[in-house]
Amino acid sequence: MSDQIFTYIALGLYFAAMLLIGYIAFRRTDDHEDYMLGGRNLPPWVAALSAGASDMSGWLVMGLPGAIYLTGLIEAWIAIGLTIGAYLNWLLVAPRLRAYTEVSRNSITVPSFFENRLRDKTRLLRILSGVVILVFFTLYISAGMVAAGVFFESSFGGDYLFGMLLIGVITLLYTLFGGFLGASFTDVVQGVMMLIALIVVPVAAMIAIGGLGETTDLIAANAGADHLSWFGGTAITGATVLAIISSLAWGLGYFGQPHIVVRFMALRSPQEAKSARRIGISWMIISLIGAVISGLVGIAYMAANGIDLADPETVVLVMSQTLLHPFVAGLVLAAVLAAIMSTISSQLIVSSSALVEDLFKVFRKESPKAKTLVLMGRLTVLVVAIIAIVLAITPNDSILGLVSFAWAGFGAAFGPIIILSLFWRRLTNWGALAGMFVGAATVFIWKALDTGLYELLPAFVLGMVVAVVVSLFTYRPNEEIEKEFTDTGTMLTVPRPHAVGDTP
């Protein structure tokens, strides 16, 4: 049996498992809330691993190791910023958002929460939120499709377009039918696979090279000592400080990512956010350390074996294929696919909810039937996927570049509004609208200016300031809003019992 056959068997088993999970979730999806939010019944471990896997995408096993391989340890500041941001998101946002979305008319999407929380009778806030989600998620999903095509091209020497379409279609199938539950349970499997791969590959490479000392010497000899410096060299310049600030600013994006915060909303209770946080952050720290080490070890491994790496973002793929048994390498390749597919599936679900729950319902006066909403949700998943595939046919940026722009868009548009909605009574619908618009617009403008500072930071700050200022001018007391704010605090302090043995 040829080596390639072993790899195909491993990938075939992985694809079959994903489709099976999607089918099981399909059998357990009865209505629109099940399809979009899993009936608010996710256990902490599912929510934690699902949030992590859907968050990291191909960036974790391709983008970040590639950036470390190319530039050095200075790129690891992104990992530090993300870890801090994720921890604060779980600590501050998760429990309160879970409680508030239920208290505020059982909101099942971020845009519907904004509208209900702020009593926006104009519907403009919900519409703008839905448009922001569709625009940035289409770009985000396109980045995942690009990663899928690059993966197939690098791993099998195959055609980029064929690989991108194959992986895109399989992801689409289990998302189309499995909905939120399908995406969440496949995320758990995919998260575990990603974690194992990012431990096994760098350790195996380091052993093959001859140990830590030999690996470090080869990195210094072939990439320079600066590659192992957290500051990119001996002298700390203004450009270095700007780069570090930009990297740390990635952490701000967590507060506004719909595909992550929707996992908070799906928890069984606000109190379970604590255990979910511990699981999720542990997974994240180990995975990020593995990704950073993979990029550095990759430099030494390529040098020791005389391999000329054409694309730095394929460093993990190349090491797994040359180091491991073909079947094991196939499982590692499946883990890379897992990173890509988990994010695409989660983003497709949120895009679907934006169009159906936040746009379709706004313009249709009569309330649609539950089956109609589920059908509309599935059709939206299909349409968004097709648009993303078309955009990915001729990519004009790296995976990291595409992800960073979409990440900034969500972080700046939604992050300040989510924080203010949860913790500030005086936020108004007009303040939220202005802040969201300014945040999203600043991302585009700042990106065009090319200042060297990551667009998320100025856009987040401006969005927050504008939302606060406009709210102060437009605030009017509202008894219903005040009561919901108080009831949310009560729900956090008084645990709500749920049935023993609850399952999602």
Image (cartoon, rainbow, N blue to C red):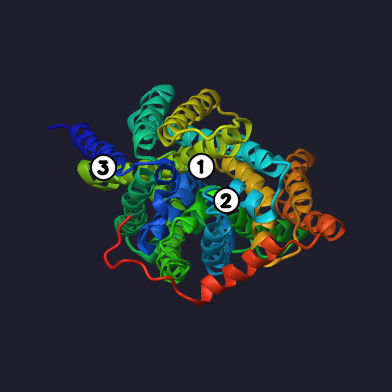
Q: Residue at x 42, y 55 (%)?
A: 40
Classify 298 as above or below 15: below
* SS at badge 3: helix
Within 10 angstroms of label 1, few (less than 14), some, or many (20 or more) residues? many
Count the marks: 3
Mark 1–mark 3 Cα distance, whole angstroms, equals 20 Å
- Name which of mark 1 and mark 3 comes first in the sequence: 3
From the top left corner, tell me how far across and down residue 179 is, in percent: 39, 40
- Residue visible at 45% across and 71% down in the picture: 271
Amino acid type, label 2: Gln
Residue marked by disc 3? 24
- Position of the C terminus by quadrant: bottom left
Q: Which residue is mark 1?
A: 350
Can you say which quadrant of the picture contains the N terminus? top left
| Residue farthest left in this picture | 1
Q: Amino acid at mark 1?
A: Val
Which comes before the other along the chain, label 2 or label 3? 3
- Quarter of the figure with residue 156: top left
Q: Is residue 246 visible?
A: no
Tell me the number on the disc at residue 257.
2
**Is residue 28 shown left or right of residue 368?**
left
Q: Amino acid at mark 3?
A: Ile
Q: Residues within 10 Å of mark 2 (few under 14, many from 20)?
A: many
Mark 2: which secondary structure? loop
* Marks 2 and 3, how far apart at CA: 27 Å
Q: CA distance from mark 1 to mark 2?
A: 10 Å
